[in-house]
Image (cartoon, rainbow, N blue to C red):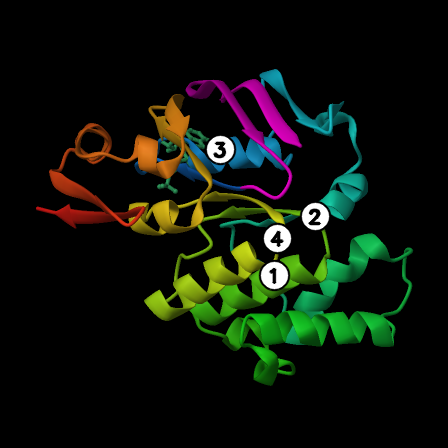
Amino acid sequence: MLSAEKVSYRTRQVEIIRDISLTVNQGEFVGVIGPNGSGKSTLLKNIYKMLVPVSGDILLDGKSLLKMSNRQMAERIAVVSQESEANFDFTVEEVVQMGRYPRKRLIEAANDHDREIVCHSLEMVGMEDFLERSFLSLSGGEKQRVLIARALAQETEMIILDEPTNHLDIGSQIKTLSLLKASKKTVLTALHDLSLASKFCDRIYVLKGGQNLCDGRPDDVISSALVEELYHIHADVFRRNEKIFIDYD
Ligand SMILES: Nc1ncnc2c1ncn2[C@@H]1O[C@H](COP(=O)(O)OP(=O)(O)OP(=O)(O)O)[C@@H](O)[C@H]1O
């Protein structure tokens, strides 16, 4: 189980998130939603150690993640961040192969097993025909799918994703979230789309102004009032057959 305990982060000038606590149980699919600038990426970066909280702690099975080495963390948690990756001209195969590094010794070459996993991961995101293409030549959505394949190739029990559906067309959004769900991995992901969040997440955390506004099952949390409070727009939220439908005015 992963938990963030009263995590705060600030720069010298400004407080960005304050006292956010969150838990992700094994096998759960947990979403973080909230308007632009509400602190979703900052929270995730504090969790996956790209930033160091000014107070609070991140625990993985009760042990502080902040005290683990990056390699130890990478054996347990794969990350798909929003930062644009690799400005060097790697092939798609090489980028996905990087997901295998935490499983290898220093300068140990990829073996047949690694190559099999790389190919299988690319198949899972429908990018198997791009193996030899230059990563930099891909479209935004293709790059995103390759980075998700790299996270899958890491064979971790948990994946943290920052807006994984960015750049993806609606078909790829559904396919990507479905494959993450079907993988039975523990997933923590920032999402913007409330319909997708309600369809895929077991629980969601709602951020506003760098604080946790509320959390719970999507069905209990997503409402017209919440949409109004977060985004200052009106929406009707319907529930039918345990599904949520959102009609924005
Ligand atoms: N290094 C920094 N210095 C100053 N402000 C920062 C810094 N990093 C982030 N911020 C600000 O903190 C706020 C939260 O940013 P963050 O990227 O976490 O939001 P977000 O919820 O992920 O937004 P989005 O939905 O637009 O991706 C924003 O207002 C951002 O401008």
- Amino acid beneath label 1: Ala
- Amino acid beneath label 2: Glu
**Residue 62 in magenta?**
no
Q: CA distance from mark 2 to mark 1?
A: 25 Å
Q: Nearer the viewer, residue 190 or 198?
A: 198
Q: Is mark 3 within 8 Å of ligand 1?
A: yes
- Which span is picked out in magenta? 1-28
Q: Nearer the viewer, residue 153 or 26?
A: 26
Q: Is residue 45 left or right of residue 33?
A: right
Residue for badge 1 = 86
- Amino acid beneath label 3: Thr
Residue for badge 4 = 184
Please, what secondary structure does the residue beneath circle 3 have? helix
Q: Quadrant of ligand 1?
A: top left
Sequence-earlier tag: 3 or 2: 3
Q: Residue at x 62, y 73 (%)?
A: 122
Between label 3 and label 1, give the one nearer the viewer: 3
Q: Nearer the viewer, residue 226 or 69?
A: 226
Please, what secondary structure does the residue beneath circle 1 have? loop
Q: Residue at x 18, y 29 (%)?
A: 225
Between label 3 and label 2, give the one nearer the viewer: 2
Q: Which mark is residue 71?
A: none
Is there CB contact under 8 Å for labels 3 and 2? no
Sequence-earlier tag: 3 or 1: 3
Q: CA distance from mark 3 to mark 4?
A: 26 Å
Residue for badge 3 = 42
Sequence-earlier tag: 3 or 4: 3
- Amino acid beneath label 4: Lys
Q: CA distance from mark 3 to mark 2?
A: 22 Å
Is 86 located above or below residue 120 in the figure? Answer: above
Q: Which mark is residue 157?
A: 2
